[in-house]
């Protein structure tokens, strides 16, 4: 392990960030916010152009004759049935983020939008913005990255590494080896820091759930650190022994809890209001999604510019940061599918689920605001991670549903850390599909330390800045990978 | 020109160069030994 320079440099960089954050969390958050702010100000146009490029290329590839090319040999058949495959994609797309932001994000956008628009019209805009952040653009980033990995692994016989397409397409020379090595390094850093943020978000969510469940107040960082300690103990075992089947069962259990919760809220809540909102969201989304991908808000004032940086741009680079991690997963389950099937399934399926999810959880929040005079906007301003539980308290069986969210969040974090430690181990050992327990444990420690940094930073805004700092360079790598794919496809003999 | 403006200018020049590089790489001929496509 210690003869591997990539592993050492990657561990050193992420380790330095972790130690810096533990010693001076506020200092790290401030530097991250300032650096990211400067980069977002000067490169907003580039990021928006990049996400629109990803969506346009995805649509073009799906509709073009290249859509018939198989991800594998021409006689390979898909390993999973289409229904199982789609449900596994949903599992990759759901996770702790949707549990955290389901109600909170649309309401947060509403706080700003309602300053410019009529308050009821603002609801549609707030849901549109949320769907834009979690929709076609986000999934086209995942899909194209996954497609590059799947195509070069299964059809060209390359290892599942970010550097492999670069070396395959441009040949192995000093320049491509350096670029490839840096690409692997940046992918590792982006995944590790991005996952640290998710750990923190999950811990904040579990903490607020426990507060809501037992009526606790002002538990502060102590309870979060306690939950974090339990989390660390929980993921040590899966990293040292191979219990992948057990992990799959845990992941399925979390998905079942989340799916059950969605149906329960839809049926036990104001169903006609929620369904009406969902149908309207679909229409508004389809009508405006393409132009929204090019919207840089350049001519609006500082309030909108700041919001645009801390939400839209942060989300988009976050998707880029997660792209190699999610990409490896969706590539592994998609062998034997055509490019057209892959792109349609990966982009359309999870986007539809996201619209449904935010329609239900966001809709419940807006229903409470408009019709029940709930002080939900105060909760959004004061404690964003407690919003989901505030909503659930107004439903029957609230103790049960709150406990379900707490359990699902915890399971999502454990399975994410274990999967990420595996992918990081694979990336840092030249594509070894069975990285040793020592390598996975090293990454488990780093992921835990980065999660601790984000928890100590104490705020979601700081978490988002630190993630964006780690993710920004990876935008360039993903674009380079897409060029590799397009170039390689030119030499395909079309079926 | 202050430091922020200088950063902004250099950062955007880097982005223009990167876009140009991607276009150039896309049209650059593939090295002969890498042209093998998989068996149909």
Image (cartoon, grey):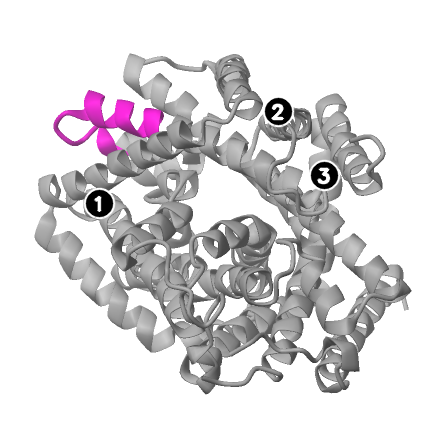
Callout 1 environment at 10 Å: few (<14), some (14 to 19), or many (20+)? many
Callout 2 environment at 10 Å: few (<14), some (14 to 19), or many (20+)? many
User: At 77% across and 39% down in the image, what residue appears?
Assistant: A10
The residue that disc 1 covers is: A364
Q: CA distance from mark 1 to mark 3?
A: 35 Å
Image quarter of residue A214: top left
- Between A167 and A14, the residue placed more toward the observer is A167
- Between A371 and A202, the residue placed more toward the observer is A202
Q: CA distance from mark 3 to mark 2?
A: 17 Å
* Among numbered discs 1 and 3, the one appearing first in the sequence: 3
Residue A393 drawn in magenta: yes
| Element type at mark 3 | helix
| Element type at mark 1 | helix
Q: Are marks 3 and 2 on the same chain?
A: yes
Counting from the top left corner in percent of width and height, residue A260 is at: 20, 38
Residue A452: give its label: 2
Q: Which residues are magenta?
A: A391-409
Mark 3 chain: A
Residue A212 drawn in magenta: no
Image quarter of residue A422: top right
Q: With respect to residue A465, does A477 lie above or below?
A: below
């Amino acid at each position: 392990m210690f003869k591997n320079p990539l592993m050492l440099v990657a561990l050193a960089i992420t380790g330095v960030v972790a130690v810096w954050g533990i010693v001076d969390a506020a200092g790290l958050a401030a530097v991250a916010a300032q650096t990211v702010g400067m980069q977002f100000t000067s490169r907003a146009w580039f990021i928006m152009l990049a996400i629109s490029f990803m969506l346009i290329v995805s649509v073009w590839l799906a509709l073009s004759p290249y859509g018939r090319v198989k991800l594998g040999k021409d006689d390979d058949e898909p390993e999973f049935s289409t229904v199982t495959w789609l449900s596994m994609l949903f599992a990759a797309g759901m996770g702790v983020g949707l549990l955290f932001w389901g109600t909170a994000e649309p309401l947060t956008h509403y706080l700003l939008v309602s300053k410019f628009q009529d308050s009821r019209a603002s609801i549609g805009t707030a849901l549109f913005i949320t769907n834009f952040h979690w929709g076609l653009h986000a999934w086209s980033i995942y899909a194209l990255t996954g497609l590059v990995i799947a195509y070069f692994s299964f059809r060209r016989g390359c290892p599942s590494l970010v550097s492999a397409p670069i070396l395959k397409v441009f040949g192995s020379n000093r320049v491509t080896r350096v670029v490839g090595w840096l690409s692997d390094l940046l992918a590792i850093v982006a995944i590790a820091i991005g996952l640290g943020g998710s750990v923190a978000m999950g811990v904040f969510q579990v903490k607020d759930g426990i507060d809501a469940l037992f009526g606790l107040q002002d538990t502060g960082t102590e309870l979060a650190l306690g939950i974090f300690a339990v989390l660390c103990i929980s993921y040590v075992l899966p990293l040292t022994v191979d219990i992948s089947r057990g992990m799959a069962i845990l992941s399925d259990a979390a998905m079942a809890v989340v799916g059950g919760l969605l149906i329960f809220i839809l049926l036990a809540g104001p169903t006609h209001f929620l369904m009406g909102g969902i149908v309207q969201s679909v229409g508004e989304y389809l009508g405006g999604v393409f132009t929204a991908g090019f919207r840089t808000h350049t001519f609006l004032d500082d309030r909108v510019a700041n919001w645009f940086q801390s939400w839209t741009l942060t989300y988009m680079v976050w998707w880029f940061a997660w792209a190699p991690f999610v990409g490896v997963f969706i590539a592994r389950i998609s062998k034997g599918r055509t490019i057209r099937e892959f792109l349609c399934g990966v982009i359309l399926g999870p986007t539809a689920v996201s619209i449904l999810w935010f329609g239900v959880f966001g809709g419940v929040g807006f229903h409470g605001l408009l019709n029940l005079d709930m002080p939900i906007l105060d909760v959004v301003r004061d404690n964003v991670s407690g919003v989901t539980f505030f909503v659930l308290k107004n439903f029957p069986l609230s103790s049960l549903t709150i406990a379900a969210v707490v359990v699902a969040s915890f399971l999502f974090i454990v399975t994410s850390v274990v999967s990420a430690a595996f992918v990081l181990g694979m990336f840092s050992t030249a594509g070894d599909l069975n990285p040793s327990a020592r390598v996975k444990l090293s990454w488990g420690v780093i992921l835990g330390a980065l999660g601790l940094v984000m928890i100590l930073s104490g705020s979601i805004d700081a978490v988002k800045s630190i993630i964006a700092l780690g993710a920004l360079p990876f935008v360039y790598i993903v674009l380079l990978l897409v060029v590799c794919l397009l170039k390689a496809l030119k030499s395909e003999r079309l079926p | 020109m202050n430091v922020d403006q200088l950063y902004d200018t250099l950062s955007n020049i880097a982005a223009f160069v990167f876009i140009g590089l991607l276009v150039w790489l896309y049209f650059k001929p593939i090295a002969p030994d890498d042209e093998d496509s998989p068996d149909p």
